[in-house]
Amino acid sequence: MALAYALVQFALVVPPLAHALGWDETVYVSQYDPRVPAAFFSAPRSRGISFLTSPFIAATPSVPVLRIGLTLLSSAALYAAFRVWRPVVGARTTALAALLFAGLWITQISGPQAMPNLWVAFGAVAATGWFLRAVTGREPRANWWLAGCVAATALFRAPDAVWLALPLIVTALFRDRRTLPHLVGGLTVGLAQWVAEAYIRFGSVQDRLHVSSATEGDMGLHLNFDNAWSSLNGPLLCRPCTATLDSPGLTLWWLALPLLAAAALAYAVRERRLLPTALPMAVAAALSVPYLLMIDYSAPRFLLPAYALLALPVAGLVTRLNSRRALALAGLLIAAQLLSQPTVLTQVTASAALTNERYRAAADGLRTLGLRPPCLVSGPRALPIAYDAGCASAQVDGNNVSTTVAGILDRAAKMPTALLTARGQRPPHYARDWTPYPLRHTPGWTAWLAPAAPQGP
């Protein structure tokens, strides 16, 4: 399954995405790129993806090399995460669960991308598996692997690691308290960097959480199921979520997933093997809470950890079917599901590639206009375009506020500076006397160049 997962990525995802990075990817990758100023790192983000990609980006600026490296790493992580479950549920169930998860288009497009949600999914699957092996199998090393997986998950998405740990801690309190020190210790180690950064950059953990909530649109009770449903087949980010669902027939698996999980739970109760089925479902539910109940926008990748965990009880249900007719029907349904996913994958990948290429074209246009490092780019699309151009980026409003108008003007007096606007959009008041240049091969974007800084004697 891991080899097949890698082949799909190499065939359908890496080629169209090999020439440019997406918006969020540039934020993560730029943090440790020695050739480019780091983009603004907002409060909700965690640095695991930046750590993961730093060896590649330190060695070469090549996007294809980064894509290939992430493809190989994600395929190995798929194998490693689901392999943990083999002693718990058996080889057939483990392989089928890996297939069900890896067969989703969002899992396939996420493999070569520098984004954290897939890695949270791998960490959650592995951590839950090691927890069960520690509790039911009494394996001494399982507790240490559990701690390591929880810590790694916290590096990729600190809040998600807390949601992961909660059902495991509650279960440990009732089943085996000897796992508690490893759970809490792994979570503490994994959160240490995020907590330290909270105090250094934001003043305290509470302040960072407050800024994170504001960045996410004031987190609270938001029933977000409709947005999650609307974005199942793309776009990759639905914010604000005005998308309409394309090809509803290709999303029937999403509606069937809770029903299949419930059937698996009922079967597990009858077999008296409740914990290996109920626990991954509980962890999946916990990891879904912030994305289904606490924000008002969506992205298909947000629920990757839930899909990975729910694949295990669903696979267990299928592999325990005794009737040949039932097995044949299940096989046909799984085959239909797998064959439907490339349709969505190719559409969304082509759309993402087009957007990324527009960022790259805008960066090429800025270079043509004479923008060379050190330089500064501002405006709604500044982050990815600035990265491609080798410039710093800065925003005075929106979710990535990193400076003030005075700060922009001060830097514009010292280095080449461009402000980007969309088609028909006027520049802000402070840039009204800057020189406009339409950027070719973009959807009407304009670069407003600040007057050249005076040269010294």
Image (spheres, rainbow, N blue to C red):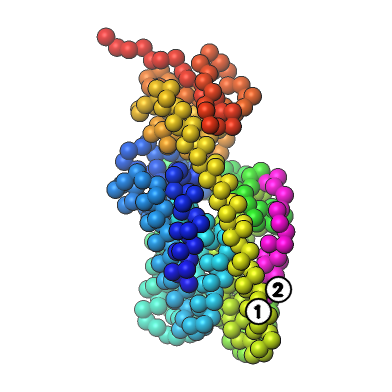
Which image quarter holds the C terminus? top left
Q: Residue furthest top?
A: 457
Residue 397: x and y in percent read 56, 32
* Left or right of residue 439: residue 266: right
* Residue 427 part of the magenta segment: no
Q: Earlier in the sequence, mark 1 or mark 2?
A: 2
* Residue 273 screen position, x and y as percent: 58, 86
Q: Which residue is mark 2?
A: 259
Q: Is residue 392 above or below residue 301?
A: above
The magenta segment is: 241-261
Q: Position of residue 238 (x, y in %)?
A: 63, 47
Residue at the image position 69 percent from the left and 86 percent from the top: 325
- Res 165 label: none
Compare residues 161 and 449 and report the one nearer the observer.
449
Residue 46 location (% of width, % of height): 45, 51
> Magenta stretch containing residue 243, yes or no?
yes
Q: Residue at x 58, y 18 (%)?
A: 429
Classify residue 124 as left or right of residue 428.
Answer: left
Q: Is residue 98 above or below residue 349?
A: below
Disc 2 secondary structure class: helix
Q: Residues within 10 Å of mark 1 (few under 14, many from 20)?
A: some
Q: Which mark is residue 330?
A: 1
Q: Nearer the viewer, residue 363 or 219?
A: 363
